[in-house]
Image (spheres, rainbow, N blue to C red):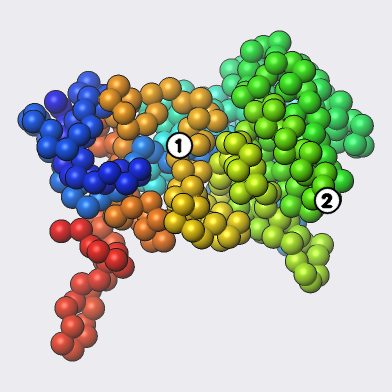
Amino acid sequence: MDVILRRATLPDGRTGIDIGIRDGRIAAVEPNLQAAAPEEIDATGRLVTPPFVDAHFHMDATLSYGIPRVNRSGTLLEGIALWGELKPLLTHDAVIERALAYCDWAVGRGLLAIRSHVDICDPRLLAVEALVEVKRHVKPYLDLQLVAFPQDGYYRYPGAVELLDRALDLGVDVVGGIPHFERTMAEGAASVRALCEIAARRGLPVDMHCDETDDPLSRHVETLAYETQRLGLQGRVTGSHLTSMHSMDNYYVSKLVALMAEARLNVIANPLINIVLQGRHDTFPKRRGMTRVTELAAAGLDVAFGHDCVMDPWYSLGSGDMLEVAQMGLHVAQMTSQEAMRACFMAVTEVPARILGLEGYGLAPGCNADLVMLQAADPVEAIRLRAARLLVMRRGRVISRMAPVEAQLALPGRPGRVTFQASPAA
Ligand code: FE2
């Protein structure tokens, strides 16, 4: 073995497990591993998990907060308008610099795979070219998947039809869309059809911003499920956001969810952004704005939580912390049972890894030795504490370390160190 992590706790609840690593892969996962290695890491009482995965992000916009101004209304539509003001100001180098800075944050947070949408509604395709370069650059330490995203509408933005094809020719991996932003419901449906046909022709996955609105009559996900089935794309198509589902008629949803399950659609909710952007026109009662996470998961669909935005025209906060995303998802969906809280952890690790089709992801022998050791005893504590990522490993090599979080108290007659863990590691 090259490295052995000793006495780790795994996300499935097994404790006292040794993880042996050889040639960048996991070679053994068992208690009391009888082997030696030049590097042994004590993981007693620490949760060791495969890396966090963000299935929905916008890396072309990240870290641009305040350029050229901030979003005053806080709405999705002002965010899109603001992005339109920022786009002509973008430079190749600035996009790359911000994206690489964000990838550094991601690595420090144990986030080693990101699916990022990239806006193709720009005759220069500046962001596409920049992010294709970033993808190449970060490949040794982070898997970056790109989605060709027509932010201003596939039919609504003049030239988007041709630009989307050009973006795919440049090496963008996934076909995107935004049917609810087209001029009419009919054009939205037509865009879903055309984009799914492109994906079928090119053998690519689909991941669309779909029904990101409070309007319960925004039903493009129905067309997405239909086209998925018609073109035989089952399992390869993802509906991102689907926020209108929170306000849809329950009888209609009972039909819709079954259609989505038949088409094996994947679903990505973005809790931080949904809770902030949706329900903006409501007074009270005010809708939460996230899609029906528990209902969709109960129907057998893969439902992941994405970050969507960090410090950009739509969202002023965030730091690449998928545990913050999981924590917000847990609250908004009221997923408070032990089982549901663990599902929230899976929604930022295993589930998005499946949606992205990551090869070699996981903790079984043969998988890539990509691991994160947390200052937490289990997945629920990891979410509760947004626990420190003590160590992040890629292909068996440590690429980031963080000191454990603790406070030194100066109280009369009380021990001085507190870590906020229910049962602190030895
Ligand atoms: Fe998005």
Q: Which mark is residue 31?
A: none
Which kind of residue does numbered mark 2 sit on?
Asp
Element on which disc 1 rests: helix
- Count the marks: 2
Q: Earlier in the sequence, mark 1 or mark 2?
A: 2
**Residue 201 percent across, percent down from the top left:** 71, 10
Say which quarter of the image contains residue 74.
bottom right
Q: CA distance from mark 1 to mark 2?
A: 31 Å
Question: Where is mark 2, residue-wise?
Answer: 249
Residue under the image location 25 percent in, 58 percent down: 404
Q: Is residue 363 at all visible to an observer of this figure?
A: yes
Q: Residue at x 50, y 52 (%)?
A: 340
For label 1, count other residues whose C-alpha is less than 10 Å away and answer few (under 14), some (14-19) or many (20+): many
Disc 2 element? loop
- Whether residue 98 is visible to the viewer of this picture, yes or no, is no
The amino acid marked with disc number 1 is Glu
In the image, which is nearer the foreground, mark 1 or mark 2?
2
On the image, the x and y values in percent for residue 132 come to 55, 24
User: Which image quadrant: the C terminus?
Assistant: bottom left
The part of the image, by quadrant, that contains residue 162 is top right
Q: Is residue 239 above or below residue 227?
A: below
The single residue placed furthest to the top in the displayed view is 201
Q: Is residue 11 left or right of residue 348?
A: left
Return the x and y of residue 298 as percentages of the image width and height.
60, 43
- Residue picked out by circle 1: 350
In the rendered image, the vertical position of residue 42 relative to residue 150, given as above or below: below
**Picture layout, residue 195 above or below residue 387:** above
Is 204 left, or right, of 53 in this rendering? right
Relative depth, front residue between 124 and 339: 339
Residue lying at 60% horizontally and 36% vertically, measured from the top left: 300
